[in-house]
Amino acid sequence: MNSINLNHPSYVIMASSKKPLILAFLLWSAMGPYIFPELGLRVEHFIMYGLLSLFALKTRFEIFFPKDRNILMLYALFIMLFLITILVTVSSNYHPSFRKVIADSENYIQPIALIALTFHCIKNLQANELLSVLEMIIRTIIIILSLNALLAASSIYFGTWMIDFFNVGGEYEGGYRSVAAGAATQGRFSGIFNQPFEAGVAYGSCLLLIVLLQILRVNTIHIRTSRRFLNLGLLFVFLGGFLSVSKVFFPLAIFVVLLFLYLNKNRFIKMLFSKRAVINLVLFYVPAFVFVVYIFDNWSGLNYLLRLVNFIGADVDVIELFTAGRFSYTDSGQSVVADKLSDINLIVGYGLGSIQAPDNAYLEILFFGGIIGLLNYIFILFVLVYFSIKGYYNHPVLARYLLSLTLFIAFASVGAPIFGINRSNYFIIIPLVITIRILSMQKKTK
């Protein structure tokens, strides 16, 4: 009988603290339905802010002051970004409704809350214990998104009745038609996510996490997740990502993952040409390929996806194709943001709730917080790059992962604000905070 190593970090975590399990609970809550769609309130809001309030009282508000220098810097930058938008809102000549200001503010408050909660749940753990927590989080994300991929695939054959039942778009009587409902008519199925972009962000970040765990398995004795589980997760991530037809997943996430593999080419080659990899190729990937082909053969959105690979040599505006017309001046004749970019008031911004911001993180922050807000956001991205460089000695693989994730965030922000996007930001921020915490530990991790 095989003996159980009770000193393994997974058991140490379970014995010493159950707080890391709260992070898995938060991830599941992110996929919950709307409770009050008129107010845009979902299950996750009650759980996240409820837990934050509980821990704030229990710790006498110490949860709002992370005692890790790197986490505190990131946390403070997001608070500054929020305060900038509030200051612009108060001082602007626009008079937006209070409800609209609250709705826009939540996108800036949520990252702050998630960073505080995540750090509170892991602050007392050592580096190897944190690695086990990261592994647990990745497994949870894989399970959640695999189930969502099956839900999206079922829409091909049974329609979107399940999605309509959960009201993923927050539709209500007299309200609006969700993006997910409109996208489904084009054969773009996102499952529980409100829109294809959200699904693309979630699946893209998960793809990067799966590759990270695959590489860590080769080099780290503390990783216990089986290769078969990761391969199965990889199948469902590709399925869900492609069914959403999100440019954030393809080509962006695919490109970033290939770059990440190149940065870890020595470890990847060792993993690729192992005996188990050859066996998996025959027993898993070939049947999986047949399964995916069968689904795609019945998928009405296949032609929509093929536009992203058949544009070469065709008379197509590439910028419009890959940015959904956000910056193109053809076809529609006018960019959705062109009339505002020449406005002198844009230097200081318009404030929250003042106007309908474009689906672009840089432009939204520019509209809401002006030049200072935009510089703050760009500085956040540079800080993440700095953390990856600074932590390279402690853990090279995680440092390269953080650098790749930052690149993914930077380019995906062209589509929408990543850190405040519904549901998907959980799959970005929680692993991000854990990674930064590991890299900030003094002891070198093998």
Image (spheres, helix red, strand yellow):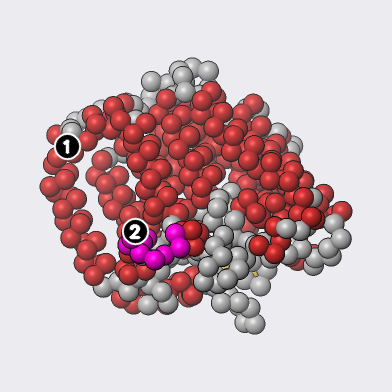
Does the magenta-highlighted stretch encompass residue 312? Answer: yes
Query: Where is residue 196 drawn, in percent x and y?
Result: 46, 63
Read off the magenta span: 308-318
Which residue does the numbered mark 2 point to in the structure image? 312
- Residue 354 falls in which quadrant of the image? bottom right
Q: How many residues crowd around disc 1 within 10 Å: few (fewer than 14), some, or many (20 or more)?
A: few
Say what secondary structure mark 2 lies in: loop
Q: Label 2 to label 1, Cα distance in Å?
A: 38 Å
**Residue 276 badge:** 1
The amino acid marked with disc number 2 is Ile
- Horizontal side of 123 relative to 58 (left or right) equals left
- Residue 308 falls in which quadrant of the image? bottom left
Res. 349 in view? no
Q: Reading the chain from its start, which is encountered first: label 2 or label 1?
A: 1
74 and 27: which one is in front? 74
Q: Residue at x 74, y 43 (%)?
A: 372
Q: Residue at x 38, y 20 (%)?
A: 446
Secondary structure mainly formed by the magenta segment: loop
Residue 433 to residue 359: above or below? above
Query: Where is residue 315 drawn, in percent x and y?
Result: 39, 66
Say what secondary structure mark 1 lies in: helix
Res. 38 in view? yes
* Quadrant occupied by the N terminus: top left
Q: How many residues crowd around disc 2 within 10 Å: few (fewer than 14), some, or many (20 or more)?
A: few
